[in-house]
Amino acid sequence: MRADAPDRSGTAFDLLVILDFEATCQEGAPPDPQEVIEFPSVLVSLRERAVIAEFESFVRPVHHPRLTPFCSQLTSITQADVEGAPTFPEVLAAHQRWLEGERLLGPNADPFAFVTCGDWDLVTMLPAQCAAADIDITTLPAAYRRWINIKQLFAAVTNKRKGFGMPTMLRTLGLTLEGRHHRGIDDCRNIAKIAVALRDRGARFELTSTLPASRYPPLP
């Protein structure tokens, strides 16, 4: 059953789910299909200025099951981490159960928005991974089709327009990098700090990006 939700355009959100996939990679062009290998999220309450819940799972790739040395060096994710992990459909279902447990999906759910660092996670990676896993992405809850690109909020607050990523945003806001860049759960925690700092500077967390179902790639 399709789980659509009311239109939230123009809504300023207090509850944010930071999402930052890590995926199979190699030097040069990514493998085809590219697959998620880490699926992390942190739930942030801007009102409380804190992370209040976390979700993380490694994901076992099935089309290209061996991680390249380049990928492991970049992400710190090892072959052993993914070999014993569930597949993407299992992790996606677990992620939705986590959202339900946090009262973000289902009857009387609290309004929230996904937050990403750029648009790649939900414009490119989620549709591609769903297609590779034979998942009809149009059946996912509508929340996965709309999000806040924190780079756009950062640009509006600081007047920086291009050439910045998460480390630059942290430095500009006087924050320190915690953990390891390109490890998904650490990136989520750092993006959460950026979100709180931007809120303290007056940013309104309204949706910046949506992807209509008509733009999702067809199943193979």
Image: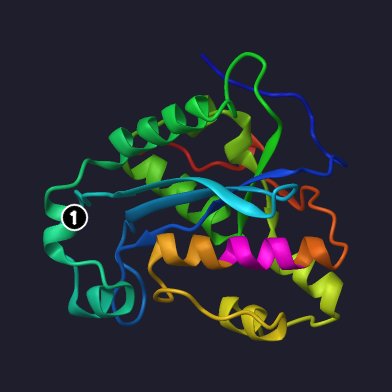
- Image-quadrant location for residue 186: bottom left
As helix, strand or loop, the secondary structure at mark 1 comes to helix
* Residue 64 in sight in this render: yes
Where's residue 15, x and y in %? 68, 42
- Image-quadrant location for residue 79: bottom left
Where's residue 137, x and y in %? 49, 33
17 drawn magenta: no
- The residue at the point 83 percent across, 39 percent down is 9
Please, is residue 189 above or below residue 213 in the view?
Answer: below
Residue position for label 1: 82
| Neighbour tally class for label 1: few under 14, some 14-19, many 20 plus, Cα within 10 Å | many
- The residue at the point 35 percent across, 81 percent down is 28
Is 42 placed left or right of 212 in the picture?
left
What colouring does the structure picture have?
rainbow
- The residue at the point 75 percent across, 47 percent down is 47
Please, is residue 86 above or below residue 30 in the view?
Answer: above
Instruction: Specify start and end residues of the magenta stretch as a single range.
Output: 191-197
Furthest toward the front, the residue is 48
Where's residue 169, x and y in %? 66, 79
Please, is residue 150 above or below residue 135 in the view?
Answer: below
Is 55 placed left or right of 193 in the picture?
left
Where's residue 34, x and y in %? 34, 59
**The disc labelled 1 sits on which kind of residue?**
Val
Quadrant containing the C terminus in the rendered view: top left
Is 63 placed left or right of 83 in the picture?
right
* Closest to the observer, 150 or 15: 15
